[in-house]
Amino acid sequence: MKRLVAIFLAVLMVAAMMAACGGSNSGSNSGSGDSGAKASSITVNIWDSNQQKGIQEIADKWTETSGVKVNVEVVDWDNYWTLLEAGASGGTMPDVFWMHSNTAQMYMENDILLDLTDYIAKDSSVDMSKYYEGVKNLYTRSDGKIFAMPKDHDTIALLYNKAIFDKYGVDYPTDNWTWEDMYEAAKKITDGSNGDVYGTAMNTSNNQDGWYNLIYSYGGNVVGEDHKSTKIGSDESKAGMEMMRKLLTVGAPQSVVAETGTDSLFQSGKVGMITQGSWMINAFYTAENHADYYWSLLPYADVNGNGTCEKEERWSAYNGLGWAASAKVKDPESCYSLIAYFCSEEGQKLQAEKGVTMGGMTGVSEAFASAFEGMDVSPFIKAEEYSLYFRPYTRNTTVWEDALQQKGAFLDPWQNPEDSALMATACDNAQKIIEDAIANE
Amino acid sequence: MKEKAPKKKRTKAQKREAVWALCFIAPTIIGLIVLNFYPAFDTLWQSFCKTGDFGKGNVFIGFANYAKVFSSSEVWHSLWNTIKYALIEVPFGVVIALILAVFLNKKLKGTSLFRTIFFLPMVCAPAAVAMVWKWLYNQQFGLLNNIFGTNVAWISDPKIAWISIGIIGVWSVIGYNMVLFISGLQEIPGDYYEAAEIDGATGIRQFFHITVPLLSPTTFFIVQTRIIGALTIFDLMFMVMDKTNLALENTQSIVYLFYDYAFTQGNKGYGATIVIFLVIFIMIVTFILQRAEKKLVYHP
């Protein structure tokens, strides 16, 4: 008897260990064979907890017709990519998940993602021309195969605190503001408060929602259309970064923004205005003093000096996530059906109405502007009347993107904004960093 | 180990016993092989490769990664940062813990309460500890600057950031060291102290001439494990220092550098090489310490 118990226990321990190592976490992976078996549930992974509720609600709508349950799980940004990569290298991946411009190319080239091309071709309700060009192109491989459908898009706007503008007697931002006007206003606030409140704040890590936009406004670029070149060291880019440097001289110092994010500084009333992406709206909408917060169009650069804003003088970055599925899912039909619903006109409109994000499809975002009662977020939609550029990316974006934020690149001028030579040198260094990174891809 | 196994064939009973023994340790063996040995050798192999995406397409490139590591000023700088951290954490962590242990080993009221308080940091998740300290140190809203009325950039000034990080390390490790010291102290027989008292030795003399030498095996154990612990430090820098922090270059540890290359930038091969480099360094340090053990530790 004793021996039987011992054998049982030993087997149990080994089995438990195997189970722990194998770790299956989704119902759809337990089906046998490659096709046929319909999944009872689908696991969806996302990284933004602000969107979890809305996404789950939309997914539940899909469940009503399909009968397949959907579990939306949130994994924070850093762990998301570590887990996804581990899953792709031989573990278990979630069934359906988000893709991002940082990594999409790498995942597509290695056939990690489910090829959606045939499903989309067979599905008469999908019209790929309705989606934003940059987002669509991002998730289409060079051989024309589609690996993710556009989920959303985001733009950038200027956020300001009316209470601070009132206190220091500064005029509110208007749609006709140039970056110079922003500088003057920021200077008034910083000087008026004796440095207690900063007119503006920007960190080297505020790229897509920050200094990238200055480079494009002044006619430069960070990564070219081909995603294989850069003009960040050009005179135009340098002019944009010189303007950035001026803003920094009246903004919060680098040591401050490195310890406290610009969004936290703004929310604690330490900063008068910051540039922000539309994915952050909810954070400010639910903040304590949100009644003082107002959005405005990003300033423009009056390059031709005629005093009005031309279409190509105001630039906002835009980026879009994609809905993708793992190539190894056992029930690709259901996964595609869920993705197609998320990206259908109905799903996209729901997403905008609920204030989750603006759509990946064009023309569905009107409802988004009114999703936040008492806060006017129309500048994000108005930004599209001017120029948009897709968030700069290459095959392995993180390598150069991180390097640009650190010493040897833009951290040097950020630390010492009074010295204009440093900023020009940083642009030259950045040119080399990006070129080297592209050469090593 | 007195009975040597006979060279003859084992009896049936012995064989059966051996099989059973194997069965019982099998879970541990399998666990070690799958979770420790295989990854360790895989890391060694990857350090000789230019690794591809998702563990596929590794190309053998010989010692190219090693040449890059040895010629990289970044790696040496990080190694020096790690050593600087160890130079704060180990001596202060040991001395303060020893003093506390001596006091808390006395039969006074409330010792168990204080023992618990000092041990608490050890029970907290390192990430939580780092977050709390990050806010204490914050230049704008931090408690430290508010209390002292100063405006010091504790973790952003490259000149002092490494000390600030070291202080967190000392604070976190004191409790653990202290508990080890207390158990060491309790093994010292009371007779020595009685005899010393009769001979008229003061408390301080007793401490230096009885406690310190008789405690040296424990001290040596703590110093050795803490040196290894300090050389592999990662979580503090990772949680406290932002990527855009000016002082990052002067505080990032070698494991942090490994993490950055292997997981953020996706260059597993180079990351693996950095880790092997650290392993070799720790092996050298441990070897030297083992040699020194005979001279440093008092064997009565």
Image: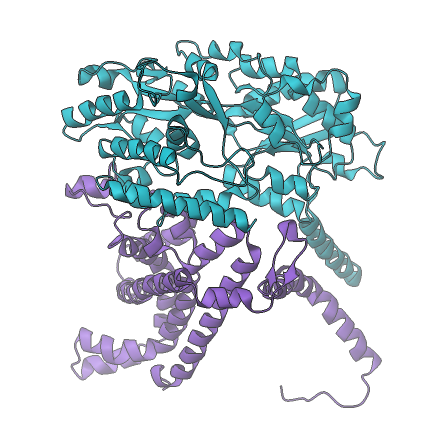
Q: Is residue B288 visible?
A: yes
Quarter of image, res A297: top left
Q: How far across and how far down the image is residue A56, in percent?
A: 61, 22
Closer to the camera, A68 or A197?
Answer: A197
Closer to the camera, A69 or B252?
Answer: B252
Task: Give the number of callouts.
Answer: 0
Q: Is residue B278 visible?
A: no
Q: Is residue A144 left or right of residue B16?
A: left
Give the residue at x 48% y 64%: B68
Give the residue at x 24% y 43%: A416
Q: Is residue B105 left or right of residue A223?
A: left
Q: How far across and how far down the image is residue A117, in percent?
A: 74, 29
Q: Quadrant of the N terminus of chain B?
A: bottom right
Quarter of image, res A198: top left
Instruction: State the colouring used for the structure image.
Output: by chain
Closer to the camera, A286 or A434?
Answer: A434
Q: Is residue A365 above or below residue B215?
A: above
Q: How far across and how far down the image is residue A116, in percent?
A: 73, 30
Q: Is residue A132 left or right of residue B93?
A: right
Chain in purple? B
Colour chosen for chain A: cyan
Give the residue at x 17% y 80%: B201
Quarter of image, res A59: top right
Q: Quadrant of the C terminus of chain B?
A: bottom left
Q: How far across and how far down the image is residue B55, in percent?
A: 65, 53
